[in-house]
């Protein structure tokens, strides 16, 4: 799941123009003469009304939610990935027992799916009424056009996120870069203070990479860096910040419970084992290996990210002086 989708799952991002969406749902209510115009988000296990029309007789408010398990019109739209128009729900056997109908005021529903740019369903845009309706085809088409306006806003946000990801991502490995560490690292420090956790920092460096570059070319060195990035991603959690911060220097930032240093050390050793296994039959004379420096910072120690990185960098150099296994 992208960071943008995670943000929407918790709350709409600040870049989103909810006032424009409010104008859209109010327009639905006015044009269709309906009790409720709404843009509804699908979050995986529930539906949440993000924007609802401001007319006095609207029965659905912003923030109202209902579970996926409940039989609903929005669920059918998401499942089918297609429009749904039910003009007289109470008179249709398929819908007469749906909770919004038999226990609620809904009698008519017209909705379209809204998609993320990658094709995943974001939610629905809909006109919901407390009376039966007879919409002409042009009204159905208009709802599709309004859906396209909302989709355009999501595309805009998607493009912004992609630009931001380019700015904080290392082009070779796909990991975060120094800019990403500066941005996200401070967030982890704030989270540590908030939840009373420790913050584990690990500094990694490839041993003898220069010899590999000199003897076999920089493209082989790049293969080595990509292999280390893959080992880091396999050995650490998806929630950990994993970054390439220099030529052959990598950093991991992990929120952890007190006393977790041993567990993190095992993950570091796993990285080294994976890396050596990758090159066990290559470059035997060069003795490629990984050195690391690890420290878990308590809430009292954490604060200056640069100073924390310097500390684990120094610990890494101490490890580099040790004799590594073949």
Image (cartoon, grey):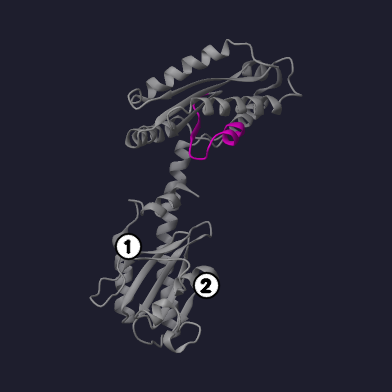
Mark 2 / mark 1, whichever is N-terminal? 1
Which residue is pictured at 50% across the width and 83% down the height? 94
Q: Is residue 222 left or right of residue 110?
A: right
Quadrant housing residue 90: bottom left
User: Which secondary structure, mark 2?
Assistant: loop
Q: Compared with residue 12, is residue 318 higher up or lower down, i.e. above or below?
A: above
Q: Residue furthest front?
A: 259
In percent of width and height, residue 39 lies at 37, 67
Q: Which mark is residue 63?
A: 1
In percent of width and height, residue 126 lies at 40, 73
Which residue is pictured at 48% across the width and 68% down the height? 69
User: Which secondary structure, mark 1?
Assistant: loop
244 magenta-colored = yes
In percent of width and height, residue 238 lies at 52, 40
The residue lying toward the viewer, choosing from 31 and 300, is 300
Which residue is pictured at 43% across the width and 71% down the height? 145
Quadrant housing residue 147: bottom left
Q: CA distance from mark 2 to mark 1?
A: 24 Å
267 magenta-colored = no
Q: Compared with residue 164, is residue 56 higher up or lower down, i.e. above or below?
A: below
The residue lying toward the viewer, choosing from 110 and 104, is 104
Viewport quadrant of the C terminus? top right
Q: Nearer the viewer, mark 2 or mark 1?
A: 1
Q: Which mark is residue 82?
A: 2
Range shown magenta: 230-246
């Amino acid at each position: 799941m992208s960071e943008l989708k995670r943000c929407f799952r918790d709350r709409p991002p600040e870049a989103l123009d909810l006032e424009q969406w409010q104008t859209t749902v109010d327009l639905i209510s006015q044009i269709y003469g309906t009790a409720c115009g709404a843009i509804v988000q699908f979050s995986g296990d529930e539906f949440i009304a993000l924007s609802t029309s401001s007319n006095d007789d609207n029965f659905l408010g912003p923030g109202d939610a209902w579970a996926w398990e409940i039989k609903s019109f929005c669920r059918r739209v998401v499942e089918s990935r297609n429009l749904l128009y039910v003009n007289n729900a109470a008179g249709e056997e398929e819908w007469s027992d749906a909770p919004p109908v038999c226990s609620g005021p809904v009698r008519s529903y017209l909705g379209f799916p809204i998609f993320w740019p990658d094709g995943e369903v974001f939610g629905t845009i809909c006109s919901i009424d407390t009376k039966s309706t007879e919409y002409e085809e042009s009204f159905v088409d208009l709802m599709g056009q309004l859906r396209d306006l909302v989709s355009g806003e999501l595309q805009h946000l998607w493009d912004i996120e992609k630009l931001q990801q380019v700015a904080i991502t290392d082009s070779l490995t796909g990991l975060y870069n120094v800019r990403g560490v500066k941005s996200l690292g401070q967030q982890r420090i704030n989270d540590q203070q908030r939840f009373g956790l420790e913050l584990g920092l690990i500094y990694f460096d490839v041993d003898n990479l220069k010899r590999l570059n000199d003897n076999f070319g920089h493209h082989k060195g790049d293969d080595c860096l990509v292999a280390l990035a893959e080992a880091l991603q396999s050995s650490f959690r998806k929630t950990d910040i994993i970054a390439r911060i220099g030529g052959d220097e990598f950093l991991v930032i992990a929120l952890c419970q007190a006393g977790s240093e041993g567990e993190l050390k095992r993950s570091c050793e796993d990285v080294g084992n994976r890396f050596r296994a990758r090159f066990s039959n290559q470059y035997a004379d060069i003795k490629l290996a990984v050195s690391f420096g690890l420290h878990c910072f308590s809430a009292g120690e954490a604060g200056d990210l640069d100073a924390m990185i310097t500390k684990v960098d120094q610990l890494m150099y101490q490890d580099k002086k040790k004799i590594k296994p073949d």
